[in-house]
Image (spheres, rainbow, N blue to C red):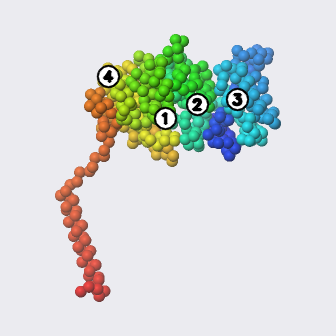
């Protein structure tokens, strides 16, 4: 029997969105589809494991022994129970989620916020169609053509919803290629502690794991932490990590600036080897009042202005780096040159030699905003040859023009990473800039100040141009003579 392929699973999930289309808002699809996908997956794996134990041990204790399962699925949460419901189906699904959370503390709060019991939006007939649709795929481990398939399909769907719902669906989604670029710049390694303080759907943590595996490292001894303010997005992140087989990592719920939750036993901020994030751009109402009374000493370079929280997140990230830590963060270009409080913070970061690189990105890469962004690489332990210097690169011209969004290509990422690793000047592309020069520019990091991106005008050969002009004038005179000759023949003119 042929196994389920990633492509088949992706089209199956997209078809489930088509079933919901018209009944509910497209930005809400993900909650329902992810919920059912998760429920079906846990149920299929539970039954698969229980049957295996039954076969091997010749008894049925696998059906009720919790220690034998990563997630214990009680009877009312099993797919077979959901399948036989014909009325009040939404209520039955809600109850199955509650039962799963009761039995599995690691799922606490992940599923209960998905409400299927709304008969106006989700009548029984529609839910029966959805359940029938999900019943047709077998999500047991033995039937998957690759081990990480569920996580991959999940990422595909997150991206599709961002595409489909525009800004509304894309609030928590950073384009995969941008994440890939940052991970390749900060290079996480096995054994490290990695944190994303604005974790969204978890893509940056997942790609950190992928990067380590691709380098031949063992990602199992990696510690992943994250914090997310939005309840639905937090739940999606938890499910995303679980479907990637990354269940024993810490994802907290709450506002990172107002209430950082990633604290140690001493109630101090936990410190990390790598911090990676794409905070919301220039967030208004970001938590200035709380920052003024911050008990963790995060804002020692200054309090950002009330209407732009960018440097609030940057300073939080710097505060959570250990003495050898490195961070990569996506920021709007404004953080490079805006004055006032932000200028003072930028000056403080540069004077302490924490800024390692500024990478300019093409415009229109992100959902819901066309503004160009940049990546700041921050480093608490720069290499000797990098001290007192900042690597500045203009990657704004290298991209593929898409229908709605521009896209970074693999070759664009390779160019940027190779230039960054080489740490050498390349004409009109990148420069290693001395802090003295940045100081002379009042700590302004605007890329155009350091990299000349003007196109060279072609040199004009005046002598050759005059000869061409004379030739053209001669041709014109000849044509005029000819024309007047014809007019004369026709009786016009003298």
Viewer-nearest residue: 468 or 341: 341
Q: Is residue 113 left or right of residue 156?
A: right
Q: CA distance from mark 4 to mark 2?
A: 39 Å
Q: Are marks 1 and 3 in contact (CB under 8 Å)?
A: no
The image quarter containing residue 98 is top right
Viewer-nearest residue: 195 or 256: 256
Q: Is residue 18 left or right of residue 492?
A: right
Please give the label number shown on residue 39.
3
Residue 249 point in image, percent of width and height: 58, 20
The image quarter containing residue 328 is top left
- Name of the residue lying farthest toward the left: 463
- For label 3, the SS is helix
* Residue, disc 1: 284
**Residue at image x 47%, y 28%?**
288
Please give the label number shown on residue 230.
2
The nearer-to-camera label among 4 and 2 is 2
Q: Are marks 1 and 2 in contact (CB under 8 Å)?
A: no
Q: CA distance from mark 3 to mark 2?
A: 22 Å
**Residue at image x 26%, y 74%?**
479
The nearer-to-camera label among 1 and 3 is 1
The nearer-to-camera label among 3 and 2 is 2
**Residue at image x 75%, y 28%?**
95
Marks counted in the figure total 4
**Residue at image x 64%, y 38%?**
28
Which comes sooner in the sequence, label 4 or label 3? 3
- For label 1, the SS is loop
């Amino acid at each position: 029997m042929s196994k389920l392929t990633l492509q088949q699973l992706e089209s199956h999930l997209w078809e489930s969105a088509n079933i919901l289309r018209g009944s509910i808002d497209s930005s809400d699809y993900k909650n329902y589809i992810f919920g059912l996908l998760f429920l079906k997956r846990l149920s299929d794996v539970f039954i698969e494991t229980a049957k295996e134990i039954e076969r091997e041990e010749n008894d049925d204790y696998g059906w009720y022994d919790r220690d034998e399962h990563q997630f214990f699925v009680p009877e009312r949460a099993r797919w077979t129970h959901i399948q036989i419901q014909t009325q009040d189906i939404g209520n039955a699904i809600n109850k199955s989620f509650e039962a799963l959370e009761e039995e599995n503390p690691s799922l606490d709060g992940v599923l209960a916020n998905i409400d299927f019991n709304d008969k106006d939006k989700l009548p029984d007939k529609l839910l029966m169609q959805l359940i029938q649709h999900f019943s047709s795929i077998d999500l047991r481990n033995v039937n998957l053509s690759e081990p990480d398939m569920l996580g991959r399909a999940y990422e595909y769907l997150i991206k599709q919803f961002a595409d489909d719902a525009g800004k509304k669906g894309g609030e928590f989604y950073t384009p995969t290629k941008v994440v890939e670029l940052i991970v390749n710049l900060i290079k996480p390694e096995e054994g490290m502690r990695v944190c994303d303080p604005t974790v969204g759907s978890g893509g940056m943590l997942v790609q950190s794991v992928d990067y380590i595996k691709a380098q031949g490292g063992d990602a199992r001894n990696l510690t992943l932490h994250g914090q997310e303010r939005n309840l639905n997005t937090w739940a999606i992140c938890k499910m995303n990590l679980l479907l990637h087989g990354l269940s024993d990592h810490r994802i907290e719920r709450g506002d990172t600036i107002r209430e950082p939750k990633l604290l140690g036993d001493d109630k101090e901020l936990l410190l990390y080897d790598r911090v990676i994030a794409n905070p919301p751009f220039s967030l208004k109402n970001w938590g200035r009042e709380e920052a003024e009374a911050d008990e963790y000493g995060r804002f020692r370079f200054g309090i950002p202005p009330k209407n732009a929280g960018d440097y609030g997140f940057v300073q939080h990230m710097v505060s959570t780096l250990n003495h050898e830590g490195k961070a990569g963060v996506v920021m709007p270009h404004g953080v490079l040159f805006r004055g006032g409080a932000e200028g003072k913070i930028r000056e403080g970061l540069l004077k302490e030699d924490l800024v390692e690189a500024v990478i300019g990105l093409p415009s229109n890469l992100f959902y819901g905003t066309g503004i160009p962004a940049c990546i700041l690489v921050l480093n608490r332990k720069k290499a000797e040859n990098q001290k007192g210097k900042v690597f500045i690169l203009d990657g704004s011209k290298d991209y593929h023009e898409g229908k709605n969004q521009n896209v970074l290509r693999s070759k664009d990422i390779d160019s940027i990473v190779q230039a960054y690793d080489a740490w050498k000047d390349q004409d009109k592309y990148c420069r290693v800039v001395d802090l003295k020069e940045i100081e002379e520019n009042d700590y302004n990091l605007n890329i155009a100040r350091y990299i000349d991106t003007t196109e060279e005008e072609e040199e004009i050969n005046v002598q050759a141009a005059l000869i061409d002009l004379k030739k053209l004038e001669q041709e014109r005179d000849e044509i005029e003579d000819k024309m007047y000759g014809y007019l004369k023949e026709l009786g016009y003119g003298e």
